[in-house]
Amino acid sequence: MDALDEIVPFLAKTARLDLKVVSLSHVLGLTGSVDGIKLLVQNETLLNNLLDLTGEESVAKDAVLCFVNITAEETGAAVVVDKLTERLVPLAYEAVLDENCKLSDAWCMVLCNITRPEHLVERVLQRLLAIEFSLEKLTTCFTRVSYNKQKCHLNYLGPLFSNVSQSKAGREVFCNQQTGLLRRLLPFVHHEGSIVRRGGAVGLLKNVCFDSSVHEWLLSEEMDVLPFVLLPLAGPEELDDETNEKLPVDLQYLGPNKRREDDPDVRKMLVESLAQLCATRKGRSYLRDHGTYEILRELHKFECSPEGDKVVLNAVENVVDILIRTEEEIGEDNLKQLEIPDDVKAKIESMTDVVEK
């Protein structure tokens, strides 16, 4: 600790550049281990100096990378949120919005890291929401794939959106029907260029589906989210004409070249979205009428194969078990609001990692 205290003055903005470079390199090395991060976050002056250096072009890259590594550990993320939120969040936000910033991707990762733990989301989100139209502007950055002119991809905005939608306040922003943010982000559920971007969009959709009060809107002609959920779960299996007629147009007669989502975590989140949409009688009826069971039946066969995943298989079986029950057997309209059999309730509630705040 004494050695670390000695280099803190060399990280000050007023220090000589050569001393800052050497000291910053040492700190960056420490961020490569859990023990090193625990040591660094005990020194608030050091953290503030690091944040100052993110604005100094000659050393900014290493300074931002330090925060990427520090916040990758939950302990480090918690300290950064406790000590630096008021300064760090606006800095990161402005860097992402700057189309000429070379470090936008790194700043996206920092924002993603500090919103991943549920107990930190609310504080970071409130600081973001204090900036007028922040999520709306970040959505614009995300949806314009070539927004950044310095070859930053901004893929980690996807997980950021997913993370902040753990919060009710975050979900409300994305479900605002006037701004249409969710509608703009839905196409990225099928984005092939980046699993990070695609997984973030799917995570956002799953979290939004947690709120049964918006299910009717989600399944309406305006939003029509079901094809976005089902299409990645569908494979090249040939279905009969009667089944194809039930399916949304985008899922009809897909052909032998159709590829199913290959990432099991993404498939699991998509199935979890269906589980949430099963919460209401209207939702269940809509899913049954639009071929959801038939798509899940084929997915179940795939998950039983060597290419499949046991966790996804279990998730599929939970949803199928709900869909094949008659409404008389289920006996309730909204499974989230009323008392229901423990086995059915467990299948619904265990399908989400989101806790309403």
Image (tube, rainbow, N blue to C red):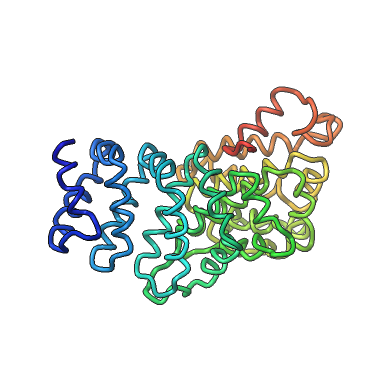
Total labels: the figure holds 0
Q: Is residue 131 left or right of residue 223?
A: left
Q: Nearer the viewer, residue 120 or 54?
A: 54
Task: Give above or below for 147 relative to 316.
Answer: below
Q: Quadrant of the N terminus?
A: top left
Q: Is residue 78 left or right of residue 324?
A: left
Residue 31 place in picture, x, y as percent: 25, 46
Q: Nearer the viewer, residue 357 or 59?
A: 59
Which image quadrant is residue 42 in? top left
Which image quadrant is residue 132 in? bottom right
Q: Nearer the viewer, residue 126 or 141?
A: 126
* Residue furthest front as drawn: 14
Q: Nearer the viewer, residue 25 or 116?
A: 25
* Residue furthest bottom as drawn: 149
Q: Residue at x 40, y 75 (%)?
A: 100
Residue 80 place in picture, x, y as percent: 39, 44
Q: Residue at x 62, y 47 (%)?
A: 206
Which image quadrant is residue 70 in? top left
* Residue furthest top as drawn: 342
Q: Is residue 169 left or right of residue 217?
A: left
Q: Quadrant of the C terminus?
A: top right
Q: Is residue 307 left or right of residue 224?
A: left
Q: Residue at x 78, y 32 (%)?
A: 337
Residue 194 place in picture, x, y as percent: 45, 61
Residue 141 place in picture, x, y as percent: 52, 68
Task: Give above or below for 14 relative to 342.
Answer: below
